[in-house]
Amino acid sequence: MAFTCARCGSCCRYLGDYLVIEREAAPFEFACCAVSTGTEFTARIDEDKRDLFRDRSFPEAHPRACPFLRPAGPQIVCTIHDTRPVQCRAYRCVILRISRQEGKEIGKVHGTFGLFSDDPGLRAAWDEAVRAVTLTSPDAEEQLQRFLEQKGYRVS
């Protein structure tokens, strides 16, 4: 299942504490630190997003958001997409949506294989699934999907 970003910005709205601009190294180039890993990186504003980056209204309205996040029409985009740090490259928000057979969504699985659900039956099935599947396997998502479908859930 290929992940497709919806460009909603939810993943980055609270990353202002984790990605820190230490200094401007050159126009549209910043020395930064990914605080969670202590990794320093150079962020360059993508050429096609420089006008978006100049607009400071979004970071002023959302001070906890990643400092490189900006709205582009109805979407929220990363202005350093080409030079974003490794944890941003690896992150995927929702990888599985789990519903009852009648279609009511009762849970989501995020990119770190964390289940977000209040449904006790789904939580029990999920606990069983993660014991049965090797999460580091390249096909872990497909294995989890098949496992949950065998338990009677709809997974997309």
Image: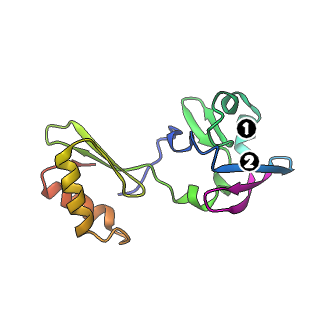
Query: What's the amino acid at mark 1?
Result: Phe
Q: Residue furthest right?
A: 26
In the drawing, does residue 83 fall left or right of residue 98?
Answer: right
* Residue found 19% across the figure and 46% down from its top: 120
| Residue sitting nearer the eye, 71 or 41 | 41
Q: Colour mode?
A: rainbow
* Residue found 54% across the figure and 39% down from its top: 9
Q: Quadrant of residue 99?
A: top left
Q: Position of residue 51 (x, y in %)?
A: 75, 35
Is residue 36 highlighted in magenta? yes
| Residue sitting nearer the eye, 52 or 152 | 152
Q: Secondary structure at mark 2?
A: loop
Q: Position of residue 11 (x, y in %)?
A: 51, 44
In the drawing, does residue 87 fall left or right of residue 33?
Answer: left
In the drawing, does residue 72 fall left or right of residue 140?
Answer: right
Q: CA distance from mark 1 to mark 2?
A: 7 Å
For the residues bearing labels 1 and 2, Cβ distance under 8 angstroms: yes
Query: What's the amino acid at mark 2?
Result: Ile
Q: Position of residue 45 (x, y in %)?
A: 74, 48
* Residue found 35% across the figure and 57% down from its top: 1
Q: Quadrant of residue 78?
A: top right
Q: Residues within 10 Å of mark 1 (few under 14, many from 20)?
A: many
Q: Main secondary structure of the magenta part?
A: strand
Q: Which of the labelled discs sits on residue 45, or is there none?
A: 2
Q: Secondary structure at mark 1?
A: helix
Per the rendered image, the range of residues in magenta is 30-44
